[in-house]
Image: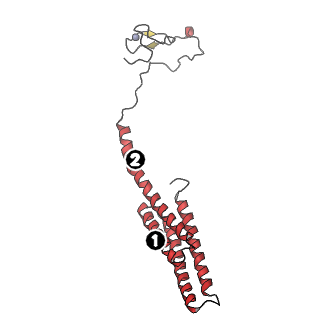
Amino acid sequence: MAAADPRTEVLVLGALGTVLIATNAIVLFALGSAPFAPAVVSNVAYLAGGIALLIALALGVLLYLYSDAADTNAQVTYSTLIVIAGGLALFVGGGFNVGTLFTVVAGVLGIVLARLPDSLEEKEPSTKSPADLRPPPTEARVPRPSNAPTSSVPPSMSSVVWFCMRCGATNRPEDSNCIGCGAARGTKA
Ligand SMILES: [Zn+2]
C-alpha cells in the first residue's frame, strides 16, 4: 500500500457524515424531550432520533470494517452498505442532509477506489509481456579498453585503437571514420 492511502479520504468523509447524522439524532432527542412538544411530536422525534443514532453506529462499524478490509471485494461490500446507510439516514434527518451527502459520496468513492487497483492489476501482465518478448537493445560497440583516453589526453600520446566492424581495419582513436572503408565509427558490420 502507498504511504498516502487514498482510503483515508473515504474514512474522513464517512466519519464527517456519521458525526452529522449522530448530531442530527441528538437534535431530534432534544426536540422530543422539549417540554412544549406535543406527545405525538415527541414520540416521532424520539423514534427518528433512535433510528438516526442506530444508522450512525452502523456507519461507524462499517467505516471501521472498511478501513480494516484488505480484500477489494469486502471494501466494495462495506462501501455499498455505507451508501445505503447514508441514504436511509435521509429519512431521519440525514445529518441535516449534509451527513447523507458525505456518507454517500464516501461510499461511492470507496467502491471506485476498490475497483481501481483491480483494473491496474489486470493491465499489468499485458503491458509486461511484450517488453519481455522484445529483444534487449543491442548497440554496436567498438571494442575499447577501460583505459580508453579521454579528451584531455592528446591523441598522439594514446596507443589505443579501434577496429572497424565492417572491414576490420585498425583505426586511431582520433579517427571518427574508418580509414579502410570510410564507415563512421560504431557502424555495424
Ligand atoms: Zn572499415
> Residue placed farthest to the bottom in the image?
39
User: In 3D space, how far apart are the residues under numbered discs 1 and 2 (Cα atoms)?
Assistant: 33 Å
Question: Which sits earlier in the primary sequence, circle 1 or circle 2?
Answer: 1
Instruction: Tell me the amino acid under the disc marked 2.
Output: Glu
> Which residue in the structure is indicated by mark 1?
84
Percent from the top left, x then y, of residue 7? Answer: 52, 60
Q: Judge from the rendering whether residue 156 lies leftward or rightward of residue 187; answer left or right.
A: right
Instruction: Please report the residue visible at 45 percent of the width from the left and 67 percent of the height from the top.
Output: 78
Q: 10 Å neighbourhood of mark 2: few (<14), some, or many (≥20)?
A: few
On the image, the x and y values in percent for residue 148 come to 52, 17
Q: Is residue 111 left or right of residue 11?
A: left
Q: What is the x, y in percent for residue 147? A: 53, 19
Q: Residue at x 42, y 25 (%)?
A: 139
Label 1 SS: helix
Q: Is mark 2 within 8 Å of ligand 1?
A: no
Q: Residue furthest right?
A: 35
Quadrant in which residue 185 is drawn: top left
In the image, residue 104 sits, relative to residue 183, either above or below, namely below
Q: Which residue is mark 2?
A: 124
Q: Position of residue 146 (x, y in %)?
A: 51, 21
Residue at 49% over, 70% down: 62
Ligand 1 shown in quarter? top left
> Is the CB of the residue bearing disc 1 within 8 angstroms of ligand 1?
no
Quadrant location of residue 154? top right
Helix, strand or loop at label 2? It is helix
Residue occupying image coordinates x 56% and y 84%: 45
Look at the picture and state if 23 lies above or below 78.
below
Q: Which mark is residue 131?
A: none
Looking at the image, is 110 positioned above or below residue 185?
below
Q: How is the image coloured?
A: secondary structure
